[in-house]
Amino acid sequence: MIRTLALFYAASDINRARCLFESALGIEFREEHRLETFTCFVAELSRGMALELHRTGRGEFTRMMLEFEVADIDAVAAALTAAGFEVRRRGRVVLVSDPNGNTIALSRPARAPRR
């Protein structure tokens, strides 16, 4: 059984990545200092899960894609656009890229199956 899960997200501009996730998901990050000189941002997603933003040097990051379900996809798209991000819609999904070219997919929750 998984008790904790931390998603490590690498970005050359963690302040811009922080803005993206705060605009898209309405989450709050706290700054954490590790090993005296290393700083990252951490947001609790739900019990036992966290998203950590880490700064990388140029060319050290890897491509990745994260997907989150959000309650109001239109409000999220508007918040991202207001924050200066280019939003691409694909049906029920909104796609946005961070400064490193990583893709964040935001989708509406799937409808519950009928009984």
Image (cartoon, rainbow, N blue to C red):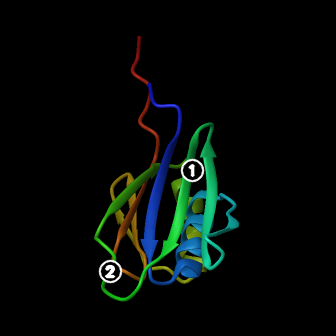
Decide: few, some or many residues near mark 1? Use Cα within 10 Å; few <14, some 14-19, many ≥20.
some
The amino acid sitting under disc 2 is Glu
Disc 2 versus disc 1: distance between alpha carbons? Answer: 22 Å
Instruction: Please tell me which residue is depicted at 50% across the width and 83% down the height of the picture.
Output: 13
Quadrant of the drawing holding the C terminus: top left
Instruction: Please tell me which residue is depicted at 51% across the width and 55% down the height of the picture.
Output: 73
Quadrant of the drawing holding the N terminus: top left
**Secondary-structure class at tag 2:** loop
Q: Is 11 placed above or below 58 here?
A: above
Q: Which residue is mark 1?
A: 50
Decide: few, some or many residues near mark 2? Use Cα within 10 Å; few <14, some 14-19, many ≥20.
few
Instruction: Please tell me which residue is depicted at 54% across the width and 78% down the height of the picture.
Output: 14
Q: Quadrant of residue 110?
A: top left
Instruction: Please tell me which residue is depicted at 60% across the width and 61% down the height of the picture.
Output: 75
The number of numbered badges drawn on the structure is 2
Classify residue 60 as left or right of residue 11. left
The amino acid sitting under disc 1 is Ala
Residue 102 horizontal/vertical position (percent)? 35, 71
- Return the residue found at the far top: 115
Q: Earlier in the sequence, mark 2 or mark 1?
A: 1
Q: Which residue is mark 2?
A: 60
Residue 91 horizontal/vertical position (percent)? 33, 55
Q: Is 77 placed above or below 69 here?
A: below
Q: Which mark is residue 15?
A: none
**Circle nearer the viewer, 2 or 1:** 2
Residue 68 horizontal/vertical position (percent)? 46, 51
**Secondary-structure class at tag 1:** strand
- Given contact means CB atoms under 8 Å apart, are the residues at marks 2 and 1 in contact? no
Residue 86 horizontal/vertical position (percent)? 44, 79
Classify residue 11 as left or right of residue 53. left
- Return the residue found at the far front: 35
Q: Is 69 placed above or below 85 here?
A: above
